[in-house]
Image (tube, rainbow, N blue to C red):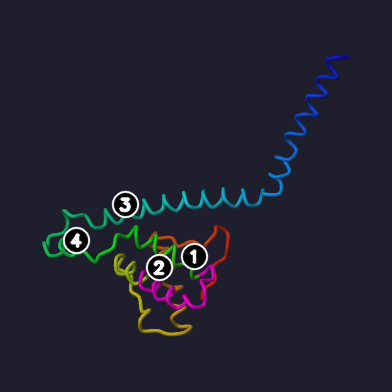
């Protein structure tokens, strides 16, 4: 009988301690799940970037470059690393898609377009952003994002599973 009472007391104490934690877990489950999925998507994205960089390194093998001037072009101080361009594009895309303040919206778009041009130049993709305006420029952005995606440079929406909106 004493054992049963001790067991019941232990279970009651465990319930008092664990129930608030379980309630908090249930209330915050969507946020916890969102963080886990975001981390997984970022991990996959880093893997894609590493594969893209490996492919680019293989495509531009230094031994295959016969012209010494071509090597100088790779060492230009104004040439940004592709990894940095990808990081800039993701950050600017998040600001562009996520609704940057109206005051900054055109500046964010200009910076985003500039990074798109640099990424296209680095990967040999033709772009016409400077020549277009309005809806044609928006369509060109979507086309370029698709080309960059096909080349291995992924520009995900601000959160995994969230559909992107083009401004």
Against 121, residue 8 (above or below) is above
Secondary structure beneath dot 2 equals: helix
Residue at 12%, 63% (x, y): give it: 67
Report the Cα–Cα distance between label 1 and label 2. Answer: 19 Å
Depth-wise, is mark 4 or mark 1 nearer the camera? 1
Residue at 31%, 51% (x, y): give it: 54
Q: Position of residue 130 (x, y in %)?
A: 35, 81
In the rendered structure, are the residues bearing label 3 and label 2 in contact, judged by CB atoms less than 8 Å apart?
no
Q: Position of residue 64 (x, y in %)?
A: 17, 56
Q: Earlier in the sequence, mark 1 or mark 2?
A: 1
Image quarter (top left, top right, bottom left or bottom right) of the N terminus: top right
Report the Cα–Cα distance between label 4 and label 3. Answer: 18 Å
Residue at 77%, 29% (x, y): give it: 13
Depth-wise, is mark 1 or mark 3 nearer the camera? 1
Pick the front one: 65 or 89: 89
Q: Earlier in the sequence, mark 3 or mark 2?
A: 3
Q: Earlier in the sequence, mark 4 or mark 1?
A: 4
Dominant secondary structure of the magenta stretch? helix
Mark 1: few/some/many CA within 10 Å (<14, 14-19, 20+): some
In the rendered structure, are the residues bearing label 4 and label 3 in contact, judged by CB atoms less than 8 Å apart?
no
- Reading the image, the residue beneath label 4 is 75
Residue 109 location, quadrant: bottom left
- Reading the image, the residue beneath label 1 is 94
Give the magenta-colored segment's residue range.
97-115
Query: Would you say 14 lies left or right of 139 here?
Result: right
- Reading the image, the residue beneath label 3 is 54
Report the Cα–Cα distance between label 1 and label 3. Answer: 26 Å
Depth-wise, is mark 4 or mark 3 nearer the camera? 4
């Amino acid at each position: 009988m004493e054992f049963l009472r001790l067991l019941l007391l232990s279970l009651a104490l465990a319930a008092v301690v664990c129930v608030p934690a379980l309630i908090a877990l249930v209330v915050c489950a969507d946020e916890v799940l969102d963080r886990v999925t975001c981390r997984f998507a970022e991990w996959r994205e880093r893997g894609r970037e590493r594969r893209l960089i490996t492919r680019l390194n293989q495509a531009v093998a230094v031994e295959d470059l016969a012209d010494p001037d071509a090597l100088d072009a790779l060492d230009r101080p104004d040439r940004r690393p592709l990894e940095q361009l990808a990081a800039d594009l993701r950050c600017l895309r998040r600001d562009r898609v996520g609704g940057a303040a109206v005051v900054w919206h055109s500046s964010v778009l200009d910076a985003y377009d500039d990074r798109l041009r640099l990424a296209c130049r680095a990967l040999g993709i033709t772009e016409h952003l400077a020549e277009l305006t309005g809806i044609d420029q928006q369509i060109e952005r979507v086309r370029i994002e698709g080309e960059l995606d096909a080349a291995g440079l992924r520009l995900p929406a601000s959160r995994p599973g969230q559909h992107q909106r083009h401004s």
